Image (tube, rainbow, N blue to C red):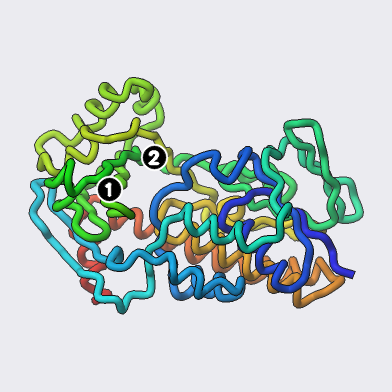
Amino acid sequence: MTTHVTIIGAGLGGLTLARVLHVHGIPATVYEAEPSPAARAQGGMLDIHDHNGQPALQAAGLIEEFRGLVLEGRQAARALAPDGTVLFEEPDDGTGGRPEVMRGELRRMLLGSLPAGTVRWGHKAGDVRALGDSRHEVTFADGTSVVTSLLVGADGAWSRVRPLLSDATPEYVGMSFIETYLFDADTRHPAGAKAVGDGAMYALAPGKAIQAHRERGGTLHTYVALRKPQEWFAAIDFTDTRAATARIAQEFDGWAPELTTLITDSDTAPVLRPLNTLPSGHRWDRVPGVTLLGDAAHLMPPSGEGANLAMYDGAELGRAIAAHPGDVEAALTEYEQALFPRSAAEAADAAHLHELMFGDDAPHSLISMFTAHK
């Protein structure tokens, strides 16, 4: 007999797991807090890597459909000095292994690949408790509950499932991103559009940065990085868009106007994104009937790997469950034995990249990395 799998969280990792299980004929239900697939914007662009994200989609039987979502030319990268001088530029010549897609489109593809009713929307996990004999009960905010013998926490940084396995909690890394958008930028914001170029743009200095990406339809999506304590951001009223963007831009006084316009001319209210991390090398002892994937298991600073790792986790967990029919513990043991060293290595790489981008030698440290890989 095949165990029904209960997945908490309909992000990319949870959906990839559900899809790989479906490919193998294994039933699963995904419980998601959001009320509908369109409840909120799903973030910006993702580069899907040929060593983890793409193999996950291959295992899900979706690689050809994925290729139809790729935005050509977006692997281009450039680094600018604060005065706008181009320090490094690399065009997208089509040979890179990190094609770019919109996160929302990738999620819709995964959702569309699942049988109707697989995802139960509007189910926000509350209390999660062990019942013994490998069984767990999840109680949702609406008062309903489910009992399962195979529970997977794919519910992100603030996972409600993780406390079953680990006392670890996310900690602030000392830096936050502020997210802004410019729409129809080639027409309405030509200087900013020219500065960003065809793909990703990095304007870095120690402890701060203006980073942007060209998305679909002339949209420029910016992440402003500032190394500041959380109290500093708490003093800014982000409900006052004009005052908040002016205060953030003040940290970049003297920078080229084509860069600061990515902050001050935002077509959306600025959104604060504090960066948190779980301890590097986070792991747990085997607990029967439950495991984690994605940020719930190995939250780390942004490095371009988060979504790729979550999908790879989901695919590997699905593969392990399919390879051990009727033996859930063998499947979870095999999955976790590979997960822990993989996650630890990626967390170390993420911390190193964070230092290259925002450390004392920025931007030269990042440019050296770029040129070393050419």
In which quarter of the view is residue 207 placed? Answer: top left
Viewer can see residue 7: no
Q: Quadrant of the N terminus?
A: bottom right
Residue placed at 48% from the left, 47% from the top?
42
Quadrant of the image containing the C terminus: bottom left
Residue 141 in percent (x, y) is at 73, 32
* Residue 195 percent coordinates (x, y): 15, 51
Left or right: where 263 falls relative to 257: right
Q: Tell me the crowding category of disc 1: few under 14, some 14 to 19, or many 20 or more residues within 10 angstroms, Cα based.
A: many
Could you tell me which secondary element the residue under label 2 belongs to? strand
Query: Which comes before the other along the chain, label 2 or label 1?
Result: 2
Question: Residue 165 — which label?
Answer: none
Q: Residue at x 39, y 34 (%)?
A: 272
Where is residue 162? Give x, y as percent: 68, 47
Above or below, comparing residue 348 to residue 32 in the picture: below
Is label 1 in a helix, a strand or a loop?
A: strand
Q: Which residue is mark 1?
A: 220
**Which of the pair 282/100 is nearer the observer?**
100
Residue sitting at x 67%, y 56%: 292
Amino acid found under the numbered disc labelled 2: Gly
